Image (tube, rainbow, N blue to C red):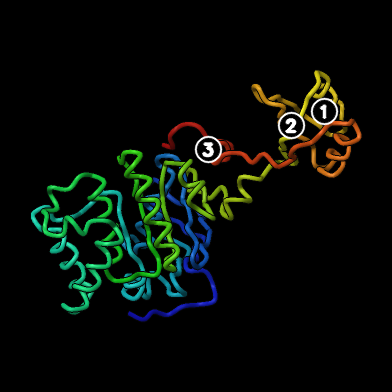
Amino acid sequence: MSDTTTDGPVLDVQGLTFSYRHTRALTDATFSVSTGSIHGFVGPNGAGKTTTLKILATLLKPKAGSVRVLGRDIVRRYKAVRRSIGYMPDHFGLYRQMTVFESLDFFGAAYGLGRKQREAVIDDILTLVDLKGRRAGLVGSLSRGMLQRLSLGRALVHDPKLLLLDEPASGLDPRARIELMEILRELSRMGKTIFISSHILGELADLCDSVTIIDRGMIKYSGSMADLLAQRSGTANYVLVLDEADGDVEEKLKSLDGVLAVARGDGLSAYRFSFDTEVTDTNALLRAALDAGWHVRSFKEDTRKLSEAFMELTEPGVPL
């Protein structure tokens, strides 16, 4: 199936606003997703994640703002947009009395695929999601992990450019989550753009190259994962590892201009420290370490975890 591409982002959201009666779910949300990206969408419960996904999937109309998928407006050209996206909601919505093959065949037919084309596509999908051995099994007999993979397969049957995944790893055991993440990486290598909402921050940090953080319906950050994890408000964190360390290293580090805090790693000649980027820089600090006669093994940035960035950018409590 051919599709229109643009030089711009696969997904472009500008000023998106939505309300449920008297409750504002989204306020002026703006972000974009580049072609081929695995983009994480993160926020607390009630932040507006599922509402956003339903709008992107053309299931809700925005009250204000615009959303474009592959350059197409999701309101004016919703039919074309639906053929370009694969939506995997946070519930399965699968017919339990069908076989695995029948389930995928049904959705393939709904998208207008011919019988021979459906058979070839379904065979490829079952191989990708590792359900080929369950082809003739009933959907109702599948484990939760298998149901998640089948739901993903259903979203892929019409070969969409953009995948919208709402909590795809919810309720999965660690092995099933790892297997699902590997499937998503393979889909990315195949050229799919993936927009994934999840609460599993550690896995998103490893999986995604870009991220949007939303809280109380407002975008708090949207950009590359690397920039987010390196981001500091006027400070930088580094780790200095020495071959040998004497008892004065910690105090000497603290005495250097611009150094704000120093902590020694347990059982290692490693020192984590933060410094004011307006007062000093890495070149000056490394030179000071060498001038002190220390044998430096490594000197590198200590990036924060996604969970730390999330806590800094979001507010406590559940929005009313």
In the rendered structure, the answer to whether residue 136 lies left or right of residue 18 reads left
Q: Which residue is mark 3?
A: 307
Specify the quadrant of the image occupied by residue 73. bottom left
Query: What's the CA distance linking mark 1 and mark 3?
Result: 28 Å
Question: In the rendered picture of this protein, how many numbered marks are placed on residues?
Answer: 3
Q: Position of residue 197 (x, y in %)?
A: 41, 50
Mark 2 or mark 3: which is in front? Answer: 2
As shown in the figure, which amino acid type bears the numbered disc 3?
Ser
Look at the picture and state if 259 lies above or below 3. Answer: above
Residue at the spot x=43%, y=75% of the render? 72
Q: What residue lies at 20% left-to-right and 44% top-to-bottom?
A: 143
Q: Judge left or right: residue 23 versus residue 38.
A: left
At a point 12% along the width and 49% down the height, the residue shown is 140
Residue name at image x 13 percent, y 64 percent: 102
Q: Could you tell me the amino acid type at mark 2?
A: Phe
* Secondary structure found at label 3: helix
Name the secondary structure under disc 1.
helix
Name the N-terminal-most of marks 1 and 3: 1
Circle 1 is placed at which residue position? 253
Q: Is residue 217 visible?
A: yes
Work out how far the residue at label 2 is from the one at label 3, CA to CA, in angstroms. Answer: 20 Å
Residue 306, percent across and down? 54, 41
| Residue 171 sits in quarter | top left
Task: Identify the mark nearer the N-term, 2 or 1.
Answer: 1
Please identify the quadrant where the N terminus is shown: bottom left
- The residue to which callout 2 is attached is 273
Whether residue 279 is visible, yes or no, is no
* In this rendering, the label closer to the viewer, 1 or 3: 1
